[in-house]
Amino acid sequence: MAKNVKKLTLASKLAKQGAVIQPTAIIKRATSSVRDIEDLVGGGAAPSTGPLYFSPIQTRKQRLLNGETIKKTATKEEVLIAARVPQKKKRNQQVSLAAGAEEEPAIQKEAAVKKEVDEQKPEVQKDLKSETMKQLKPEIKQEIDPLVNEDVASPQSLWYRQLENIRSMRSLSAAPVDTMGCHQCADPKADGKTQRFQKLVALMLSSQTKDQTTFEAMNRLKARTLTPNSLKDMPVGELETLLHPVSFYKNKAKYLKQTTQILIDKYDADIPDNVKELVALPGVGPKMAHICMAVAWDKLTGIGVDVHVHRISNRLGWLPRPTKEPEHTRVGLESWLPSTLWAEVNHLFVGFGQTICTPLKPNCGQCLNKDICPSAKVVVTPTKKGVR
């Protein structure tokens, strides 16, 4: 009995609703007792004396795909709308029209347009890519310092962005080197020769020593009138007491006595004005010599690489290969870094290493380079329960 119950099909629902969809055009067929569902929607079905049959299963497009032919009439050509798109072919399924059947003009037109669009797609994508690169190129150029050579072959492609971030971080907070570095240890009221000597002494004491400790030791020495002659006449034991707790203060006291005697005998109580003769002094290395030339003689001869510059350069990937010695780091940096930045790198990296990129536990979470630094280790500290 249930099979004889008439079901509400799509055709009957559309017939009851009347004009629900307004198609672009309606195909009118020759007199036939068979009509399609698509012909019903719109201003209602055309009057007909014979019985009408609407297939509850198949539409005109489905019958066409199944091989049924459609009679051509002299009526207006049908326009293909979104609801009339043919069904997609299933994999490994061959669909063909019956013998003598022809595709509708709208379907042929759609296939031709699709083929043309597919052929033009690579060219369009290429044009869009070139347009995008033209728009981005000027913006990238604006970020580079005009004094920096854009063709520099650096080991780190993002080196200038990293440098800009370090500049920003250094400008936000002061570091010990800003107020207690060797350039701040000399007496501003002393003559030029004495100031140069005091800066050299501060550099000799700063090796493997914190700036705070060096600055305090220099204040104790300046209280005794720090000049080459006064330091020459000071007993070694007294000098060691003034230097303590500077690292290796006994060795440094010995080097200071020897260097002072050389300066008095050979340079008229002044310091050499070149790296070669500075390095020849007892207790003076390449890092001290280059920094001394910059702060004492205002001459740029190279990058002063201390433990901070050495560590950060390796962490950022600024070297062609990892280095173990500061002097190797200096050679690697000077091989590609523009000389206009040599004087700035030491001061920037030392302060950055004292505040954020520290030796043992770097504060990567607050570093602006945490997303572009190959050595970044961002650790999220879990919040304790009950603590808000």
Image (cartoon, rainbow, N blue to C red):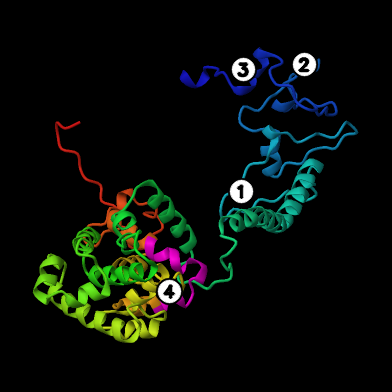
Query: Which one is in front, 129 or 111?
Result: 129
Q: Mark 3 or mark 4, which is nearer the start of the sequence?
A: 3
Local packing at callout 2 (Cα closer than 10 Å; few below 14, some 14-19, many 20+) is: few
Q: Name the residue under label 1.
A: 89
**Closer to us: mark 2 or mark 3?**
2
The residue lying at 19 percent from left, 64 percent from top is 224
Q: Which amino acid does label 4 sit on?
A: Leu
Q: How far apart are marks 4 and 2 (CA)?
A: 82 Å
Q: Is the magenta stretch mostly helix, strand or loop?
A: helix
Residue 338 visible? The answer is no
The residue lying at 26 percent from left, 57 percent from top is 362
Q: Is residue 334 magenta?
A: yes
Q: Mark 2 or mark 4, which is nearer the start of the sequence?
A: 2
Residue 379 visible? The answer is yes
Q: Give the range drawn in magenta.
A: 331-347
Q: Distance between the residues labelled 4 and 1?
A: 62 Å
Q: How far apart are marks 1 and 3 (CA)?
A: 29 Å
Q: Which amino acid does label 1 sit on?
A: Lys
Q: Mark 3 or mark 2, which is nearer the start of the sequence?
A: 3
Residue 326 image point, x, y percent: 32, 76
The residue lying at 14 percent from left, 31 percent from top is 386
The residue lying at 30 percent from left, 81 percent from top is 263
Q: Mark 3 points at which residue?
A: 13
Q: Does the magenta stretch include residue 344?
A: yes
Q: Mark 3 or mark 1, which is nearer the start of the sequence?
A: 3
Residue 143 image point, x, y percent: 56, 55
Q: Name the residue under label 4.
A: 333
Query: Which one is in front, 36 or 194?
Result: 194
Query: Which one is in front, 28 or 158?
Result: 158
Dot 2 falls on a residue whose secondary structure is loop
Residue 184 image point, x, y percent: 33, 59
Local packing at callout 1 (Cα closer than 10 Å; few below 14, some 14-19, many 20+) is: few
